[in-house]
Every structure is written in C-alpha cells, then in structure tokens.
Image (cartoon, helix red, strand yellow):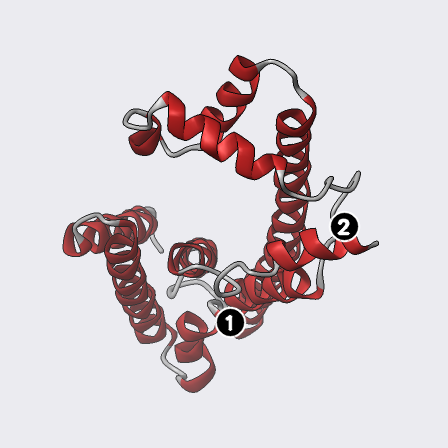
Amino acid sequence: MAQQDFWIRIINRRGPLLDPVSRTSEIIFGLIMVLTFTCSISAATAMKDDIRTTLWAALGCNVAWGIVDGFMYLMALLIERGDTITAVRTVLQSQDKGEREQVIRDYLPPAIETIIQPGELESISQAVGRLPEPPNKVPITWKDVKAAGAIFLLVFFSTFPPTLPFMLMEDYEKAIRISNAIALLLLFITGYKLGRSSGYRPFPMGLVFALVGALLVASTIALGG
C-alpha cells in the first residue's frame, strides 16, 4: 500500500489540471463544433422553431463531445501510466545495462537524448533503481477526474457565446452574422493563445484558426445560408 501511495503522490505532483495548450485546444474544438451548427441556419428560410432546434442540437453535440473527450483523457492517462510502470519495472529488473539505458533513452525528449552521455544514463538508471517497486496499476485520482470535468466544461461553455445573439435578437439574419463574428473572434483569440503557449508565432496561429471558421461561414453563405 505504501508503494502505491508513493506512486500516486508522484502522479499528483503534476502541474495545473490542464496545461494552456490543452485548455485552448478544447475551446477551439467546441467553437468549431458549434460553428458548424450555426452556419447551417438559413436566415431566409429558417423559422424560430428551426433555429431553436439547431441550437439545442449544437448544445447536445457539445455535451456529447465533452463527455467523450473527458473519458478519452482518463483512458489516455491509464495507458500512459501503465506504460511508465512497465518501463520502470524493466529498469528495476533487467540485468542488461544496454536494455536499461535504451528504456531510459526512449523516455527522454529528443533534444536531451541526443546530448546525454552513457555515464549519465547509468546514473539515471541507478536513481530509478532506488525507486520503490511500482504497483501493478496506478488508479485514477480525484485530480484526474477534476481535469476530465474541466475538459467537459470547456467544451460545453464554448457553445454559449456564439448562440447568445439568437437568444437576444429578433432579427435572425443579423443574429447569424453577429454569431459568426463572435465565433471567429474567439477562434482567433484561442488560436493566438495556443500559438503563444506552444512556441509558435501567436498572430499567424490565430489567423489560421480564424480562417478555418471563416471557410465554414463562407461556404454556408455561398450555399444560401
């Protein structure tokens, strides 16, 4: 039990629930999803009930997407942890120095792997050898569940800003245009933040994501939307 507690403490030393790249990515996914629905509304032919049905469909789709995305996040954690435990156990049990060092190399970032020396690999191997024997599995923790819930909420709440014009305005044609503008602006902002967090040039990254949304809007307008 003490060994499992040690490994759970190691896991919970991770940083924030979601890193900046994950947060902005989830918002972008939700915005693109809702934009595909709002772009399907035709101002010329849509009735009020049709618009309400489309907005409910967008909300339902993002709810489903958020649940699936949160679940896949938890599954990815389990797979990642299982792989880590297997690697640590290999280093602990293997009598082959080359095998131990190769396992460690496989877990190093490429930039570090190319400069690390054999003696340093052996030092890391010895340090890993002093770790407690890993358990057969490391369970999902409450922090993991909260992160999955955060993913769901990000996808869910990204639905609302583009739908607000339909709730507040009677002129549906104008509401469609304002809704599209809000979605494009939010795509640009989140793309900008994603670029800054991931080391790419923020402004071009924001333009790329806004362009994806603009293509959706333009194709809909060309088809009579």
Q: CA distance from mark 2 to mark 1?
A: 40 Å
> At numbered mark 1, what does the secondary structure look like: helix, strand or loop?
helix
Quadrant containing the N terminus in the rendered view: bottom right
Q: Position of residue 173 (x, y in %)?
A: 33, 71
Q: Pointer 1: residues within 10 angstroms few (<14), some, or many (20+)?
A: some
> For this view, does 70 lie left or right of residue 38?
right
| Residue at screen point 78% across, 42% down | 135
Q: Position of residue 73 (x, y in %)?
A: 61, 49
Q: Residue furthest right?
A: 1
Q: Amino acid at mark 1?
A: Phe
| Residue at screen point 19% across, 55% down | 202
Q: Quadrant of residue 172?
A: bottom left
| Residue named by callout 2 | 3
Q: Nearer the viewer, mark 2 or mark 1?
A: 2
Q: Is residue 14 above or below residue 146?
A: above
Q: Amino acid at mark 2?
A: Gln
Nearer to the camera, 208 or 56: 208
For the residues bearing labels 2 and 1, Cβ distance under 8 angstroms: no
> At numbered mark 2, what does the secondary structure look like: helix, strand or loop?
helix
> For this view, does 211 lie left or right of residue 18?
left
| Residue named by callout 1 | 157
Q: Pointer 2: residues within 10 angstroms few (<14), some, or many (20+)?
A: few
